[in-house]
Amino acid sequence: MSLPVVAIVGRPNVGKSTLFNRIAGERIAIVEDKPGITRDRIYSRAEWNGRAFHLIDTGGLEFEEKDEVLEHIRHQAELAIEEADVILFAVDGRVGVTATDEEVARLLRRSGKPVVLAVNKLDHFKHQDQAYEFYQLGFEEVVAVSSLHGIGTGDLLDAVVSRFPEREEEEYDKDTIRVAIIGRPNVGKSSLVNRILGEERVIVSPVAGTTRDAVDTPFTYEEQDYVIIDTAGMRKRGKVYESTEKYSVLRAVRAIERSDVVIVVLDGSEGVTEQDKRVAGIAHEAGRGAVLVVNKWDAVEKDHQTMQRFTRTIREEFAFMDYAPILFISAKTGQRVTRVLPAVKEAADQHAMRIPTAVLNQVLRDAAMSTPPSTVHGRRARIQYGTQVSVKPPVFVLFVNDPELVHFSYIRYLENQLREAFGFVGTPIRILLRKKKKD
């Protein structure tokens, strides 16, 4: 299920980026006391009272001046408004209502989206009465804040979260495997979708960036129901100039959140790039099952060891995703495409696999007997027992006498032992340590 989206909008220099950083909990946006510094939307994931959401920072909206940069900023903000579930409208409480604020308010009312008005820069409680003036903009929820000092941000986030849409029931049966196809632009994602479906359901074009939105296509293969989600290509942040392409990045992230398994498509004719790893990293961090698909293999000049060399390169570059199977295909010719869905099915099954507690603890005991944890200052970690607490991805909690005594390399060893015993092909697994409470 995808997360709600909150867009921060307003005229220039009202403190949107400072507010963004305050909510996101880290300094992501560039903050400088000059209008127009934030040229493109910046995305972050945030959380308040247990509700996670995506946060979008936007450039300032200007309506009076006409130049190319301001037009670009305005277009970016309008796209953010279109994508948002809730809009956080920031104004400057010290300046008061301006003509531009009124124009922005009209734009937001036309959008029909829920709006929370943040009257910013009220750095002292005695100034909060200045927020009342802003009710004339026509929004019910007006909150006085100081994003610089953190005053009022809790009340602001309470108001924002209360306007999130209700969590929708999953539109597909629980046994349906949801597959997101991700990768850089022009690696052949749409061609792969068409080849899998056996019909022209999505546009295929040699021009990078054709697929703008995520498109769901339900289908059945060998009595298994699937929903395949074709996403727009993800580009390196510094090279995403087109607003529509940047708009697509969040769509792709949300598609990953809705999926069980992702197919990470690589271009065999170009090799592995840093952006390929970033794209795959999003899926890994989200805990999704994964299959690595090297496309355009027909265009690669090969000898008898080309595939082995490319496999070694992938395993080195994608060391964090060593659980993912690798397929070499050509969506253009159909070479080995029939192997994709069986690999996806296996990854989905393993992603949802649950291990009986007794069997799990036998494997953990055998692992500890074979290779005990190292001693730290004369003390050794002891794993009392473990249990699987969730699936998709499989998460295991191990109760130990002291988590500080367990080195990360030993956790990696235990993960390898679990994979050797149970497989977990195509899925990340999580191992959490908890201190065993004394009886």
Image: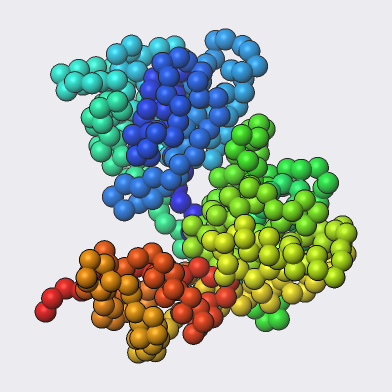
130 or 261, nearer to the observer: 261
Labels in figure, total? 0
Q: Position of residue 160 (x, y in %)?
A: 35, 40
Q: Which of the 4 quarters of the picture holds residue 201?
A: bottom right
368 or 186, nearer to the observer: 368
Q: Position of residue 255 (x, y in %)?
A: 57, 55
329 or 344, nearer to the observer: 329
Horizontal relation, residue 380 to residue 267: left or right: left
Q: Position of residue 1 (x, y in %)?
A: 48, 59
For residue 380, above or below residue 47: below
Q: Which residue occupies 45% across, 31% down? A: 29
Residue positioned most to the front: 378
Q: Position of residue 49 (x, y in %)?
A: 28, 50
For residue 416, above or below residue 119: below
232 or 213, nearer to the observer: 232
Locate the C terminus by quadrant: bottom left
Q: Which residue occupies 22% across, 66% down? A: 377
Horizontal relation, residue 152 to residue 224: left or right: left
For residue 186, above or below residue 300: above
Q: Which of the 4 quarters of the picture holds residue 33?
A: top left
Q: Is residue 437 visible?
A: yes
Q: Is residue 197 visible?
A: no
For residue 7, above or below residue 284: above
Q: Which residue occupies 26% across, 77% down? A: 382
Q: Which residue occupies 61% across, 53% down? A: 277
- Say how the picture is coloured: rainbow
